Amino acid sequence: MDLLNTAWKLLLLRGVLGVLFGILAIAWPIDTVIALAVLWGIWALVDGLGLLVAAFSPGGSGGQRLLAGVMAVVAVLAGLYAIVHPDAAAAALTWVIGIWLLVRGVFELVGAFSREQTGSSRWMGVLSALVDFLLGGILVAHPGKSAVGITWLLGIIALVWGIVLIVLALVVRSQAHDLAEGGVTPSPA
């Protein structure tokens, strides 16, 4: 019973936070992109510091420690850059994702015409490659606008999931109330 009371409250909290994030991301997409870039920069900085500690810790081979040291320097520099220049970092990250989609599209297109692919699976591979080419091209050609578009998409997803979690919280609360009255047992989810 206490578990259900806690569960619905946590679901409600997650739902409200999702709705709030969704509204903020949709209303202020550029500010959201910058905030996400700064958060990524902080994560990269912390990751780099962790790698730096690993590089100077005893154990492991010299090559592993050297690799950890190089990765630490790259992560710290990337993190600092993202914190100081979040707009440029967001555009660069969008550009990298676009290139990745273009490369993925090439591999999907080649895979679609391999011997193992036939009929509808071949055409699904071609369709998937075309979608990757389209999205990758858009991201590479317009990284700033694409970052804003991705933020709107994240905002819409957060808003929808927030509403779903709020409705689920109300359903769980109703089941907890029914159990407290000794009536209905909850149905398995």
Image (cartoon, rainbow, N blue to C red):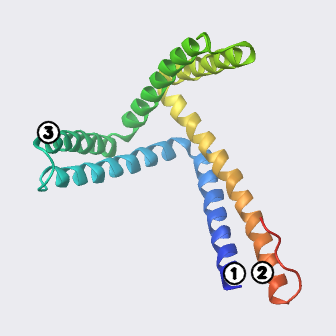
Q: Nearer the viewer, residue 53 or 78?
A: 53
Element on which disc 2 rests = helix
Is residue 122 depicted above or below 39 in this figure?
above
| Distance Cα–Cα, label 3 vs label 2 | 57 Å
Residue at image mark 2: 176
Disc 2 residue type (three-letter): Ala
Disc 3 residue type (three-letter): Gly
The picture places residue 174, in percent across and down from the top left corner, at 82, 76
Q: Nearer the viewer, residue 168 or 60?
A: 60
Residue at image mark 3: 63
| N-terminal label among 3 and 1 | 1
Element on which disc 1 rests = helix
Image quadrant of residue 95? top left
Residue at image mark 1: 5
Q: Kindly give the residue lying farthest to the right in the view shown.
A: 183
Residue at image position (33%, 51%) is 42
Please state which of the two labelled residues, at mark 3 or mark 1, is closer to the viewer.
Answer: 3
Mark 1 packing: few (<14 Cα in 10 Å), some, or many (20+)? some
61 vs 147, left or right, is left
The picture places residue 115, in percent across and down from the top left corner, at 60, 10
3 vs 91, left or right, is right
180 vs 49, left or right, is right
| N-terminal label among 1 and 2 | 1
Look at the numbered discs 1 and 2 and tell me whether their residues touch, using CB distance below 8 Å.
yes
